[in-house]
Amino acid sequence: MPRTPLILLIILVLLLPFLPLLIWSIAQGWFFPQLIPEQWTLEHWQQLFSTSSRIGEGVMQSLAIALTTTFLSLLVGIPAGRAMGLMEFPGKPVLKLFLLTPIIVSPLATLMGIQFVLIRLGLSGTLLGVILVHLMPTIPYMTLVLASVFANFDVGYEIQARSLGASPIKVFAQVTLPLIAPGVAVGALFAFLISWNEFLLTFFVGGGSVFTLPMVLFTLLQGGNNGLIAAVAITSIVPGLVFLFVASKALQNEAALGGLGSV
């Protein structure tokens, strides 16, 4: 089978489960045994984007938290991943196991202790407190992804650039960062999606003061408005798809440049 039709078929299969959500979001009502709704409306989308609705607040807060968490994860993950990938030091296997702990262990196991610390610091129920607790699962993913990237990294490129007079900042921006860009894109994608979809940590630490999109969706699920629930659910997956598209484009461009460089 040609490549393009195969890709389109895969995309169709992946998006097919979201078709009922799309129909629900623009349906006035959809009852058995109707194959398709008899009446259509944009009321649910209008309510979603209404200035008086808290849904918009949830979208903006989720976006701010996810982007900030991703940025901070990169700030920590790049140097930590470099150290894990390039350096040998005592206790390295133990440190790797420690990084896996937030992924393996249930968040509830450590959440109560972390919340107690945040309460003592006055950060419980604040946006900053939620961002800090979101770093707990995102930094390990970012560090482990970048550690695998740096494990195959050739520092000779950096040494050569330095010998030609480039400053450390220029070496990082023009040599190191382009070479590790695929790993950065993958790590950032993981961090963004984890933070964007996080409910449990936000619920406990945010204390109802930080109203993110997963909390909006959880609240609506108890109300029974299927059309509005579908509209919010579709909205919740859009940023992830956009981020995935941007990351995949970055990976494709990097692969193309790598192919040109090997010719």
Image (spheres, grey):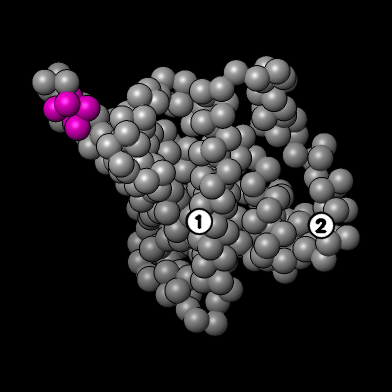
Task: Give the class, few, some or many, for how many residues have Cα within 10 Å of label 2's Cα (few <14, many ≥20).
Answer: many
Separation (CA) of disc 1 from disc 2:
21 Å
Q: Amino acid at mark 2?
A: Leu
**Residue located 41% across and 20% down the image:** 152
Number of numbered labels in the structure image:
2
**Residue located 51% across and 60% down the image:** 63
Residue 69 pos. (x, y %):
57, 52
Can residue 197 be seen in the rendering of this structure?
no
Q: Amino acid at mark 1?
A: Leu
Q: As rendered, which of 180 and 232 lies closer to the eye?
A: 180
Residue 219 pos. (x, y %):
66, 61
Q: Which residue is mark 2?
A: 118
Q: As rendered, which of 56 and 100 lies closer to the eye?
A: 100
Task: Give the class, few, some or many, for how many residues have Cα within 10 Å of label 1's Cα (few <14, many ≥20).
Answer: some
Quick check: 102 above or below 56? above
User: Which of marks 2 and 1 precedes in the sequence?
Assistant: 1
Q: Residues in magenta?
A: 256-261
Q: Which residue is mark 1?
A: 67
Quick check: 112 above or below 215? above
Can residue 78 be seen in the rendering of this structure?
yes
Residue 131 pos. (x, y %):
64, 56
Q: If the image is split into quadrants, where does the N terminus sit? A: top left
Residue 150 lies left or right of residue 139; in this view the side is left
Q: As rendered, which of 249 and 199 lies closer to the eye?
A: 249
| Tag 1–tag 2 contact (CB < 8 Å) | no
**Residue located 69% across and 57% down the image:** 130
Quadrant in the rendering for residue 10: top left
Quadrant in the rendering for residue 101: top right
